[in-house]
Amino acid sequence: MRRIWEISRRRFLKLAGIMGLAPAGQVVRAAEAAPPLVPIAAPGFQSLDAHQVETLKAVAEQIIPADQDPGAKQAGSVRYIDRVLAAEQRDRRPMYAAGLQGIDQTSRLLYSRDFVKLSFDEQTAVLEALEKGEAPGEIWTTASSRQFFELVWNHVLEGFYGPPEHGGNKDYVSWKMVGFPEHSGTM
């Protein structure tokens, strides 16, 4: 139980600033200087938080679903995307964060649930709307759902078919599926 006389440090500084115990601008500047809250990366990931990982896994499963062979989710396409966003394409992190948020926003507008909670057919409908550039949601008024879908589509394919040392194609699943010999170091 919280006692009335217990206040947080932040609240104390605000009150102190109001009462003149701290220079007025100092509290404001300190709040502005604080780094923005960044979601903590999911265990084993560098760029994506747990919800983003689960959303991307569901998207990847839509793009290359598992059947008698593993799909993009099992091949580790999401791990590949995470590695790409942590290194050579780190400038695309904000685009991914906004786009994944947009997928959930569209899902909630159409079905009142986050993307990962939708049925396979509902997820398909959401991704089709993104692909056509017709996805509802405020995020898509400033960003192209079609461009985001194409980016994710390409990254999923790269993660599925690319060399395993880049984070995807776990156990050479796609190469085995198409009859390509295991990586010989010549690529």
Image (cartoon, rainbow, N blue to C red):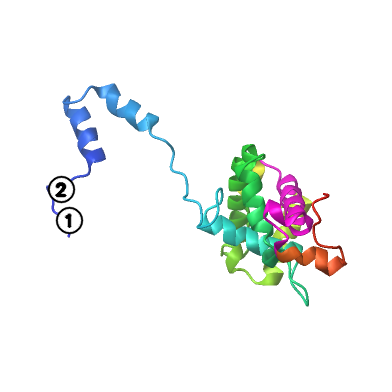
Q: Quadrant of residue 126?
A: bottom right
Can residue 113 be seen at all in this image of the molecule? Answer: yes
Q: Main secondary structure of the magenta part?
A: helix
Quick check: is 158 in the magenta stretch?
A: yes
Measuring 17% from the left and 24% from the top, which residue is drawn there? 20
The relative height of residue 47 versus residue 35 in the rendered view (above or below) is below
Measuring 64% from the left and 62% from the top, which residue is drawn there? 57
Pointers 2 and 1 in contact (CB under 8 A)?
yes
**Magenta stretch?**
142-170
Q: Three-letter amino acid code at disc 1?
A: Arg
Q: Secondary structure at mark 2?
A: loop
Most distant residue in the bottom direction: 68
Q: Which residue is mark 1?
A: 2
Callout 2 crowding tier (Cα within 10 Å): few <14, some 14–19, many ≥20:
few
Q: CA distance from mark 2 to mark 1?
A: 7 Å
- The image position of residue 8, as x and y in percent, is 22, 44
Measuring 61% from the left and 52% from the top, which residue is drawn there? 100
Q: Three-letter amino acid code at disc 2?
A: Glu
Q: Which residue is mark 2?
A: 6
- The image position of residue 41, as x and y in percent, is 50, 51
Quick check: is 70 in the magenta stretch?
A: no
